[in-house]
Image (tube, rainbow, N blue to C red):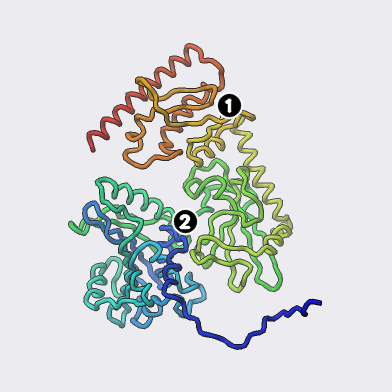
Amino acid sequence: MTEEWKFDVPTTGTKYLPPDSRYMEALSSQGYGFEAAIADLVDNSIDAGAKDVVVHFLRSGDRLVSLLVIDDGYGMTEEELDVAMTVGGRRDYRSNALGMFGTGLKSASLSHASAVTVVSRTRTSRPAGRRWAMQNALNGFQCDIVEPMYAQSLIDRYADKPITWQGTVIRWDGVKDFPQHGERGQTDRYLQRTINKLGMHLGLQLHRFLEHDDFNITVAVEDIDTGTIYMDFSVLPLDPFGYPVSGRPDYPRTFTVRTGEAPPVLFKAHIWPPKSSVDQYRAIGSLMSRQGFYFYRHNRLVQAGGWNNFRQPEQHLSPARVAIDIPDGIGDLIRLTVKKDGVEVAPHLIADLESAVDEQGARFGQYIADAEATYRDSRKRAGATRKPVIPPGRGMEPSVRETIEDELPVLPGEEPIDIRWSNLEGDVFFDLDREDRTIYLNKRFRTALLGGRRGGMNDVPMIKSLLFLLMHKAFEKEYSGSREKDNLQLWQSILFSAASAEEKRLSTDG
């Protein structure tokens, strides 16, 4: 006979087990993306009442040296700074604060930098600073005290923009994502790519704040050798629900979910025009990833798309987006990740969504059906004027492939057209293999077309997209007529000449 089951585990006391210093290493390995880490720092600025935030890249010639986030918020005294730099430091969060766990500043920063310095000043206190260097953090949580004169000079460096009387400067050194060799052009390409992605991310996650006239985020680059500031621009809001006209006249609608004693959760269901070309629709992600639930906590977007196990993403649901403001006091029904890049929704809340109704008494399932119908109707209208095509396959950037399949009817049962690099002989830029359904590009020109960047399976998407549009019809027939052959030869000559010019330009620049 087995012993009677104990519902409570009996204990005999407690024992103090402080974290090992390697905990800091674990804290910095939580998978923070670069853009998400910067957004976490800006959250702190918003909580501090900042009206102006500057994300400042510093370079010396072709080498990036530091990244700073500066704000004109309330600032911190030395005592408050000690709490802010303590892992899991306890402080009283305002009811509408964006911070939650007391780890974001440290975890986000040390995920991307070998050291993070925070200098701050309030209206009634002198500048003070603390610095976490990973090597010291691993040696028993030893946090450096910043020399007061340097703390003052760093605050003074940003006097009037944005700091006037009070504010905070966060400085990253040893940024892992920065180009390491400072090769000519490499830094410029990195900045162009990174700042574009950062602007889009901040514009999306914080769009409700940026829509107010009294809040601004600026991204800038400064050459510290010359004092020149360039690439200085304001981040624009990117509202995922900012369509000019609804995709369906009777939307948006709000569905109310009630679960137990928890506050009701409102699901505001929108339907986008399926063919919209505005950034608020196209720039957020792929057709699959941008549909679904958009969760907000205190007006900050914490999940952009996804169905949270309610259903699988499908192409015909691409117009469907649902805005949910997480109510306070919701408990474990909706749990936010530390990185604020998603939420975990309790299964019974998702189950209750099935029976949720809107103001007219319609169930949430009707919304799903309406979104599908809106997409299918748009495809029928496009199909009436556009001929079906063989779809693109491997070698094409997935987002481009999705756009092509969204814009053009697809011939059913046809093998897709792959696009690959190959060693081709003679003065040719491309070759067609109808039997293998493949467009081959001359590998000789790959480096020139990439402009020195690293290649991959889905590289040069612009060239591949143009080739697909020019040549997909050639695969729909077993043989080419004289007119089609002449067109192929024309394209061959012009593209070969253009690629040769790119090759010559690259060798000259190098």
Q: Are marks 2 and 1 in contact (CB under 8 Å)?
A: no
Q: Is residue 168 visible?
A: no
Task: Identify the disc placed on residue 188.
Answer: none
SS for callout 1: loop
Q: Is residue 391 visible?
A: yes
Name the residue at the top extreme.
Answer: 482
Q: What's under tag 2, amino acid-wise?
A: Leu
Find residue 176 and report its horizontal and vertical position in percent. 35, 58
> What is the C-alpha distance between the residues marked 2 and 1?
36 Å
Q: What's under tag 1, amino acid-wise?
A: Lys
Find residue 356 and report its horizontal and vertical position in percent. 71, 60
Name the residue rendered at 63%, 34% in the picture. 380
SS for callout 2: helix
Q: Which residue is mark 1?
A: 387
Say whether residue 16 is left or right of residue 310: left
Circle 2: is it few (<14), some (14-19), or many (20+) Cα within 10 Å?
A: many
Name the residue rendered at 45%, 38% in the picture. 457
Q: Observer-nearest residue: 84 or 432? A: 432
Find residue 358 and report its horizontal and vertical position in percent. 69, 58
Q: Observer-nearest residue: 48 or 433? A: 433
Name the residue at the right extreme.
Answer: 1
Looking at the image, tell me whether mark 2 or mark 1 is earlier in sequence order. 2
Q: Which residue is mark 2?
A: 204
Name the residue rendered at 51%, 35% in the picture. 394
Image quarter of residue 309: bottom right
Q: Quadrant of the C terminus?
A: top left
Name the residue at the bottom extreme.
Answer: 13
Image quarter of residue 385: top right
Name the residue rendered at 29%, 78% in the picture. 145
